[in-house]
């Protein structure tokens, strides 16, 4: 039997007198004192020094590692991560257009407290400006216990099993949730529909850029389905869950201790309401090589289904779960083809795109995902 992460209190955010920052120069000792005090950590008053260091890797936001030094020994956090808007104009425009800053801030404010058993970093501050252009998150630093995943490195079947267990801990408490359905920022489907309506415009740029690396059967799949991305999202129906939307290894942290199966999920900039099969399909299609996925996916989805049922989900049999997974296999195809042609070219990025689209296309064909999604 596996064990999950310790339950964490996620409701003790700093109060509204700590506004989101516009520049990392605003991350002063006094600012951190107010964050800690607002989060109910009185030892924050003894904070004497903060050392800041940028964290590389983020495209849509800046990450800063803060090392905290206190006047006296304390159990208060000795390091934190701060997330704030990117200073790259192009990425900033995309983040604003897709409401990424609002989505992630609202997730920590409204959704995280509803899933206390899911592996998440504790959030000490989640603040958004009135115009939703600035945000600041102050998060628990898990780097001493967990390592970041890498989508270019192969995952094991055991790792996938642990990740899907954690996904079920996210989905089950929010299954057809009336509490979530009252949150206008996520319940309104207009934003999601707009994203999918824009995907067909990416087909030709994708084929022009990557066509030499594609199989003919995959190109035929893309040409048959990508133009109907908007049709698919409009067909979504209950049951609904909160989708992560970018549920892949790069956004998952794994334990560094052998035998410890602790998982933490990060980066909630693309959350939305939708069918449950999207996130597990997007994850497995990326995490496992095609032959490994073919051999393991049915057993993995059976385990995931069992975790959903033990989490309180009713009226969702395995056959229905499997069909939702099959339908969800369209997501990776639509997202990568619709967006990848517009992404700046880098050696790692291009390698990732080619590798991932081969996996997602093979998955969609293996599972007859177009038929499951009503795109035939």
Image (cartoon, grey):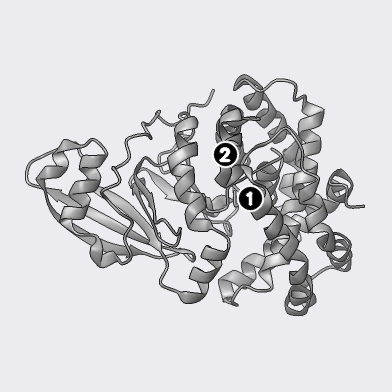
Give the mark nearer the N terminus: 1 vs 2: 2
- Does residue 77 show up? no
Residue 240 picture quarter: top right
Mark identifier at residue 287: 1
Residue 32: x and y in percent read 21, 51
Relative vertical location of residue 87 with respect to residue 254 in this rendering, above or below: below
Mark identifier at residue 163: 2
Query: On the rendered structure, is 101 left or right of 14?
Result: right
SS label for mark 1: helix
In front of the other: 93 or 63: 93
- Does residue 79 show up? yes
Query: On the rendered structure, is 103 left or right of 39?
Result: right
Residue that appears at 84% across and 58% down: 228
Query: On the rendered structure, is 32 left or right of 222?
Result: left
Residue 186: x and y in percent read 59, 45
Mark identifier at residue 12: none
Number of numbered markers? 2
Residue 30: x and y in percent read 16, 54
Residue 297 picture quarter: top right
Neighbour class for label 2 at 10 Å: few (<14), some, many (≥20)? many
Residue that appears at 16% across and 43% down: 44
Neighbour class for label 1 at 10 Å: few (<14), some, many (≥20)? many
Marks 1/2 in contact by CB < 8 Å: the verdict is yes
SS label for mark 2: helix
Residue that appears at 73% across and 64% down: 199
């Amino acid at each position: 039997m596996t064990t999950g992460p310790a339950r964490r209190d996620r409701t003790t955010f700093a109060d509204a007198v700590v506004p989101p920052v516009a520049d990392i120069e605003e991350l002063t000792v006094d600012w951190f004192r107010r964050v800690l005090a607002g989060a109910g950590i009185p030892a924050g008053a003894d904070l004497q020094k903060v050392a800041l260091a940028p964290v590389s890797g983020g495209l849509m936001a800046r990450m800063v590692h803060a090392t905290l030094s206190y006047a006296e020994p304390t159990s208060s956090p000795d390091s934190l991560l701060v997330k704030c808007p990117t200073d790259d104009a192009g990425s900033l425009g995309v983040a604003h257009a897709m409401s990424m800053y609002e989505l992630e801030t609202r997730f920590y404010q409204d959704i995280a407290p509803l899933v206390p058993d899911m592996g998440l970093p504790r959030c000490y501050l989640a603040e958004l400006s009135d115009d939703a252009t600035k945000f600041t998150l102050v998060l628990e630093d898990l780097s001493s216990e967990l390592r970041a995943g890498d989508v270019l490195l192969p995952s094991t079947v055991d790792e996938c099993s642990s990740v899907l267990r954690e996904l079920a801990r996210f989905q089950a408490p929010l299954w057809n949730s009336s509490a979530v359905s009252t949150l206008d920022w996520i319940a309104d489907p207009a934003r999601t529909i707009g994203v999918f309506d824009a995907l067909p415009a990416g087909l030709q740029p994708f084929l022009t850029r990557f066509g030499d690396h594609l199989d003919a059967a995959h190109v035929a799949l893309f040409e048959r389905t990508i133009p109907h991305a908007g049709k698919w999202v409009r067909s979504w129906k209950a049951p609904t869950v909160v989708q992560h939307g970018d549920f892949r290894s790069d956004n998952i942290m794994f334990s560094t201790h052998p035998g410890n199966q602790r998982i933490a999920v990060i980066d909630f900039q693309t959350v939305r309401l939708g069918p449950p099969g999207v996130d597990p399909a997007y994850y497995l299609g990326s995490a496992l090589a095609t032959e490994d996925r073919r051999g393991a996916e049915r057993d993995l989805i059976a385990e995931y289904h069992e975790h959903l049922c033990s989490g309180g989900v009713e009226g969702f049999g395995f056959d229905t779960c499997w069909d939702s997974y099959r339908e969800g296999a369209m997501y990776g195809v639509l997202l990568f083809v619709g967006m990848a042609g517009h992404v700046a070219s880098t050696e790692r990025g291009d390698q990732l795109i080619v590798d991932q689209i081969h996996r997602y296309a093979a998955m969609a064909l293996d599972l007859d995902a177009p038929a499951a999604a009503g795109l035939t």
